[in-house]
Amino acid sequence: MKYMKPRTIITYLTDGNPAWIKTVEFSNRLIKWISIPRKDLKEALKRDELNYSWVYMLLWVDENDNDTAYIWQATVLWKRISDHYKDTKKDFWNNVICFTYKDWSLTESDINYLERELINEAKRVKRYTIKNWTSWNNWLIQEHRIPDMEEFMEDLKILTLNLGYPILKEVVTKKELENEKNIYYLHSRWSNAKWIYTEEWFLVFKWSIWKSDITPYQLKQGHIQRNREKFINEWLIRINGDNIELLEDILFKTPSAWCDILSWWSLNWWIEWKDKNWKTLDENERK
């Protein structure tokens, strides 16, 4: 994502409370964003702008502490969100964020296209678990509208990140990958692994290998076994003989999270992992 120039973002707290309903928009752009906590949905339904076409995301944290989203679109937003609110099979979400144009000019073809692009992009960056997919085709939108929708997507990436939802943010940029001092290695105790220390989280690279043994301590931690099984079921890791192999790059919020799930011993990640010059993370970042 490229930030070519400064932007002014206007946030309006409709009741003066940051945790309540709020609208967000650029000072010189058409895109508009509204955040609605589930508990305040009844009040939000009184707002006139919910009578128009929007793209939206239901957001929550699942039982394994994973950020999760359901992405959809609606020609009349209040009707669709009301259905979600009443649906006992979808009572897990706690916040909905919605996007449209301030002049209400989004057509049904536009929102179908945006829904597909949002799902594809969110799945590609792999920060959130996405609970749905779509199959809208390009021919459903007129060719001259595609550049407008691409611009909409770029604005949306900035707004979601600014408001604390990095669902569309690239995990690692090309610049970070080229900077080899951020890449660390482990070649010990039958393991061969590589990960990158980014500005926020830790990305463990595909084909990293650990021993698959689980210690008595780990067996007592139910979430460790559940997360390992989840990764296996989603084809993110596999058991190959006595080893665990990563089949995809996996993003973790903390080093201890992936050590718990993948490793069979406790690691001091500040000193065990070393860059290509054999310097530890502790030497590079803290000293």
Image (cartoon, rainbow, N blue to C red):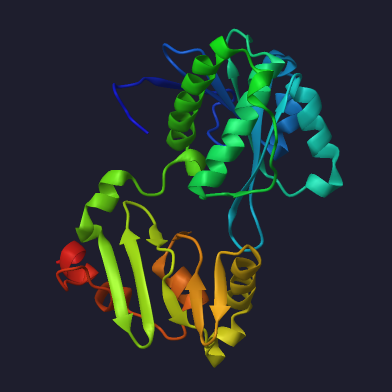
Instruction: Determine the residue positioned at 17% across, 64% down.
Output: 284
Residue 31 seen anywhere in this rendered image of the structure? no
Instruction: Determine the residue positioned at 55% across, 69% down.
Output: 237
Q: Is residue 12 left or right of residue 85?
A: left
In the image, residue 246 sits, relative to residue 41, either above or below, namely: below
Residue 60 picture location, percent across and down = 64, 48
In the image, residue 164 sits, relative to residue 266, either above or below, namely: above
Residue 103 picture location, percent across and down = 59, 7
Between residue 201 and residue 195, name the one nearer to us.
Answer: 195
Name the quadrant containing residue 28: top left
Instruction: Determine the residue positioned at 64% across, 17% down.
Output: 141
Between residue 3 and residue 33, name the one nearer to us.
Answer: 3
Residue 227 seen anywhere in this rendered image of the structure? yes
* Outermost residue toward the bottom in this view: 216
Between residue 128 and residue 119, name the one nearer to us.
Answer: 119
Name the quadrant containing residue 13: top right
In the image, residue 10 sits, relative to residue 177, either above or below, namely: above
